[in-house]
Image: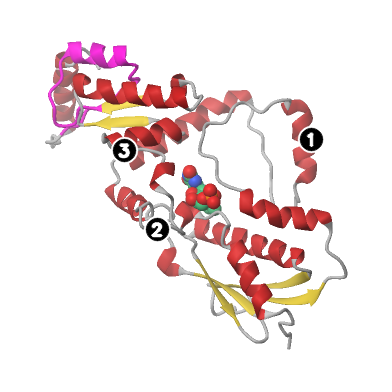
Amino acid sequence: MTRTTADTEIIAKAIHLACRAPSLHNSQPWRWVVGPAAVDLFADHERVLRSADRSGREAIISCGAVLDHFRIAMAAAGWQTNVDSFPNPNDRDHLASLDFAPAHYVTAAERDRADAILTRRTDRLPFHAPANWESFEPVLRKTIDHSKAKLDVLADDARPTLAEASRLTESFRRYDEYYHDELHWWTEPFHTYQGVPPDALVLIGDAGYASVAIVGFHSQAGWIGFNLLPAEAAPKIKRIHELMKQNGRNPAEVELGVSPYGKQITPDDLKRYRDLGVEEVTLVLFDLPHTERDLVTVLEQRSETSGGA
Ligand SMILES: Cc1cc2nc3c(=O)[nH]c(=O)nc-3n(C[C@H](O)[C@H](O)[C@H](O)COP(=O)(O)O)c2cc1C
């Protein structure tokens, strides 16, 4: 039988640091149990986000991140961690059982890695193309442990397909109320130590001024003004551009979309949206026709009244 020889206080501190690990919507879907002989890590089903993460795979990845951080924190405190993965075949939520052995010394690199946990954060801003990719790629390949991770670099001609898949996913989620409920649940302001702070939200489908501030600072995806005619969208778009400039960002980085939703628009409105910089207008059909033929007729009528949008 193994024994947890490390001091409980050291373990508690390491868990505290490890819990800064990234997790889906910062849901922190893990549960730690510190016993006399071992520290056990479990997946916490109460915290698996079933809409965003139907199979629970991203929760497991998040638990992998917390385990990695925990090992780093213990190493910096002078302890090597032995990991027994999935120790109980009858309990798949029991992800790992850990015990410890004192390390002979702590390297500077181990300390640096633990310090990095406090400064690491998810960057939601759009990425520039990497600088000096040709020399960086071999370094990246060398850094990766190929038994644990795989690096694929997409060829230039595959990128439009990836972009299309990403746009498609976004449009599926745009009107997925369950998903948005879940996201709002995890971005409520009172969650100060868990969940995603509202000011870090990648914004979808809200037209309030708070959300205008959000996109100005953080959004990677863009802004979709909801239920807005051009005159209503104009001051919000102006504010987005102002905020982006104040933060040293180029307004062209954010893709603007609008849905007039229940409001009737004319071909002139479409031109007004375009002049405001709106790239996508989403029209909503409330009474979905029963047959395909009727659907085509309605869409044709819409396209005539909306100037071919
Ligand atoms: C498995 C996994 C999936 C994630 N998916 C997203 C995502 O789709 N979009 C996003 O902005 N952040 C994503 N994140 C980042 C988390 O939202 C972020 O880690 C969490 O809010 C904590 O913030 P921090 O990483 O800045 O500490 C993901 C993280 C993990 C581990």
* Residue 100 % position (x, y): 75, 76
Residue at 40% across, 27% down: 243
Q: Which mark is residue 5?
A: none
Spot occupied by residue 46 in the image (x, y as percentages of width and height): 41, 68
* Relative to 52, 83 lies left or right: right
Q: Pointer 2 and pointer 1: residues touching (CB < 8 Å)?
A: no
Say which element carries label 1.
helix
Could you say which is closer to the camera, residue 227 or residue 72?
72
Task: Point out residue 169 in the picture as x, y percentages from the top left corner.
Answer: 41, 39
Q: Amino acid at mark 3?
A: Ala
Q: Give the residue type that dot 1 points to.
A: Pro
Query: Of label 3 and label 2, which has the lower sequence position?
Result: 2
Give the secondary structure at mark 3: helix
* Cα–Cα gap, marks 2 and 1: 41 Å
Q: Which residues are magenta?
A: 259-285
Say which residue label 3 marks. 210
- List x then y, in percent, for residue 63: 57, 62
- Mark before the other along the chain sequence, 2 or 1: 1
Residue visible at 54% across and 77% down in the picture: 91
Residue at which label 2 appears: 191
Q: Which residue is mark 1?
A: 138
